[in-house]
Image: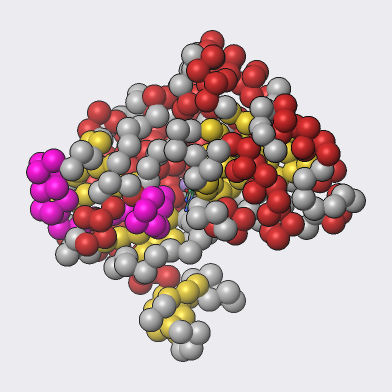
Amino acid sequence: MFWSRASNNANTFVFNGGSIVRTYEDMIGEIVSALEEANRVVITTHTRPDGDAIGSQLALGNYLSSKGKKVSMINSDPSPYNLEWLPGSEKIIVYDGSLEHVDMIASADLIVVLDTNNKMRLGKPGDSIKEASVPRILIDHHTDPENWFDLMWRRESASSTAELLYEIFADWDLDGIDSAVAAPLYVAIMTDTGSFRFSNVTPALHRMVGDIVERGNLDPAQMYAEVYEKRSVEGLRLMSTVLSTMQLHFGGLVGSMVISKRSLKDSGASIEESDGFVNNILSIEGVKVGLMFTETERGTKVSFRSKEDYQVHKWAQSFGGGGHRNASGAFIKADLDSAIKRTIAAASKFIDITTSGQDEGISDEDADYLSMLGVQN
Ligand code: 5GP
Ligand code: MN
């Protein structure tokens, strides 16, 4: 059976496209009841967690702890360095497969998966989470959820997982949002909306954020500084090198940049400091799609970002990745040059490049670019 949100009424769910059997309020109510009744809750999120992942996890963890629940926050990867100041951050455990960690998941009576809907993206604890015999709740805003969750609170149009979490808190008890819940919620929404500028930012979201700021007595300037004004000199040096790799394709419709292993090493920066570089591409007038290629030991990570109706999630999916319509990622098990070629060559299948007045495929300019990168064609 499947549940979907009826397009003509935002507050109604329909069963198999047929008669209306359950309302939006029922669904959120079931999740609140499950959380209320649980004693030991495991909360997990995706590999290489970002601000929405960690912020949502800490907001829910701190909220449930103050409701008297025993909370375990377990992830496959460590948190980014610029989020370590968030309240409760020190309680997040990096899963190592030890008996203690296996037992932590096995002894939970409820599991909550945040900001991904995909077992692979959970990393090392993914199998134990998926196979757990207790209810698994999904709270997420990505496309194409897997079908093993028992309860779901999801909406692709939501700006962030944190926005969906706030809706759950609103149904349960808004007064539970103290500063230890508000700060991670705010950071999650700020980071996932590019500081409140993406197309899924609505008046309602601004009102929600206003409420979060008031309840937590937060200082937005301080929140921004804590997250974004922590760059190292090395990080900025890396940015300047990466910006210089900027290349335009298809008459300026698509822009790309490269982070090579060498430039990373030469800069002395850590790879986390490159987070957000890709957005610089979209600041060029006329560019609708930004691609960042990051060279790693095992292959090439591709970050896709887009504007307006230029959708990139299927493009990322075609390389085994996924994400959102305007922000996706994939990992291509190939070296930098072939990953770039394959990604650019596939563009016309996923976006309309005809408006750019150029042929699909690799232009002479792109070929020059590849050779500049030291690519053997
Ligand atoms: P980023 O480029 O920042 O790593 O990822 C952007 C978005 O794409 C993430 O929020 C995530 O939803 C999605 N994403 C990134 N990498 C992958 C991947 O390997 N698989 C899937 N399914 N989604 C990804
Ligand atoms: Mn998110």
By what rule are the colours in the image chosen?
Answer: secondary structure
Q: Give the quadrant of the C terminus.
A: top right
Q: Position of residue 6 (x, y in %)?
A: 53, 76
Question: Residue 161 or 366: which is nearer the viewer?
Answer: 366
Residue 107 in view here: yes
Q: Is residue 252 left or right of residue 134?
A: right
- Asked if the stretch drawn in magenta spans residue 346, the answer is no
Where 8 falls versus 228 (above or below)?
below
Q: Is residue 76 left or right of residue 363?
A: left
Q: Position of residue 75 (x, y in %)?
A: 29, 41
Residue lying furthest right in this view? 357
Q: Position of residue 5 (x, y in %)?
A: 50, 72
Residue lying furthest top in this view? 233
Residue 182 in view here: no
Where 54 falls versus 125 (above or below)?
above
The residue lying at 26 percent from left, 60 percent from top is 130
Q: Give the quadrant of the N terminus.
A: bottom left
Residue lying furthest front in this view? 376
Question: Residue 307 or 303: which is nearer the viewer?
Answer: 303
The residue lying at 58 percent from left, 74 percent from top is 7
- Asked if the stretch drawn in magenta spans residue 119, the answer is yes
Give the quarter of the image for residue 212: top left
Question: Residue 215 or 165: which is nearer the viewer?
Answer: 165
Count of numbered labels shown in the rendering: 0
Q: Is residue 305 left or right of residue 152?
A: right
Give the quarter of the image for residue 335: top right
Where 108 falls versus 7 (above or below)?
above
Q: Position of residue 372 (x, y in %)?
A: 72, 26
The residue lying at 43 percent from left, 83 percent from top is 15
The residue lying at 20 percent from left, 38 percent from top is 96
Residue lying furthest bottom in this view? 19
Q: Which residues are magenta?
A: 98-121
